[in-house]
Amino acid sequence: MTERKQIGFFEKYLSLWVILCIVGGIALGHFNGEQVQFLSKLTIPYDTLVASVVVFVVVPLLAGFLTQKSLIKRHGHEWFTKVFLPKFKPVSIIALLITLVLLFAFQGTTIIERPLIILLVAVPLVLQTYFIFFITWFGGRKLKLPYAVCAPASMIGASNFFELAVAVAIALFGLQSPAAMVTVVGVLVEVPVMLSLVAIAKRWRYNHAL
């Protein structure tokens, strides 16, 4: 009961927000393609890209690490996890949803006008995700891993880390490249597939190893 009370508004309906952002991004890219596509024409020098990685990835990561160490040392781990972190949950979720809108906006026209290509990309990804999940799940059961270890391990194994794939594809091949389109389809497929795997893991919950 305590964990349910800590679930905020964004977390409670996160699946709905993700679906709405995907649909909204596709619609935005399809009906306002010219307004969105101007971003793909921007050229970013690699020295600027490296500086951006340092400023927006390395520095925040280091600042987060130092902040965590400092606050835990000053206020304790319980205060950090139960008081400090919940205040920042909406920020991270909103950033994720905005990213989804932009990703699907850039490929909205392609997704709507070329569904066969999307299907050819999606089918192998779906099969691969389920295949890896079941291998990891039954492998964990065979090794007599507890449910709290087996279920997350299966999810992590099945995840394709498309967020990183999208970033690499855009940086190397551009926003309008086939590589970027494939990674965006991966995000589109992964959301419902991972939700279905969560449902499977909850249904197959066990209290002891085989």
Image (cartoon, rainbow, N blue to C red):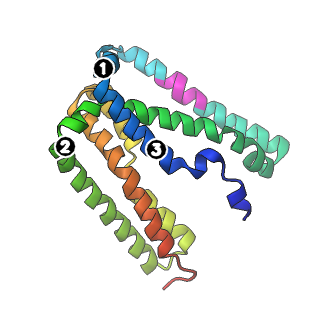
Q: Position of residue 30 (x, y in %)?
A: 28, 29
Q: Is residue 66 magenta?
A: no
Give the Cα distance between marks 3 and 2: 21 Å
Please, what is the three-letter code of the amino acid marked with disc 1?
Gln
- Give the residue furthest to the right: 74
Please, what is the three-letter code of the amino acid marked with disc 3?
Val
Task: For mark 2, give the secondary structure.
Answer: helix
Mark 2, residue position: 115
Residue 116, numbered circle:
none
Quadrant of the rendered image containing residue 109: top left
Secondary structure that dominates the magenta span:
helix
N-terminal of the two: label 2 or label 1? 1
Instruction: Magenta stretch: give its range.
Output: 53-60
- Give the residue furthest to the front: 31
Q: Is residue 56 magenta?
A: yes
N-terminal of the two: label 3 or label 1? 3
**Marks 2 & 1, CB-CB < 8 Å contact:** no
Q: Please determine whether, in this image, residue 106 is positioned above or below residue 22.
A: above
Mark 1, residue position: 37
Query: 64 or 18: which is nearer to us?
Result: 18
Q: Position of residue 204 (x, y in %)?
A: 47, 76
Q: Look at 36% across and 17% down and name the residue there.
A: 46
Quadrant of the rendered image containing residue 163: top left
Q: Please determine whether, in this image, residue 51 is positioned above or below residue 171.
A: above
N-terminal of the two: label 3 or label 2? 3
Q: Position of residue 44 (x, y in %)?
A: 36, 15
Q: Look at 54% across and 22% down and name the residue there.
A: 55
Q: Is residue 159 visible?
A: no
Task: For mark 1, give the secondary structure.
Answer: helix
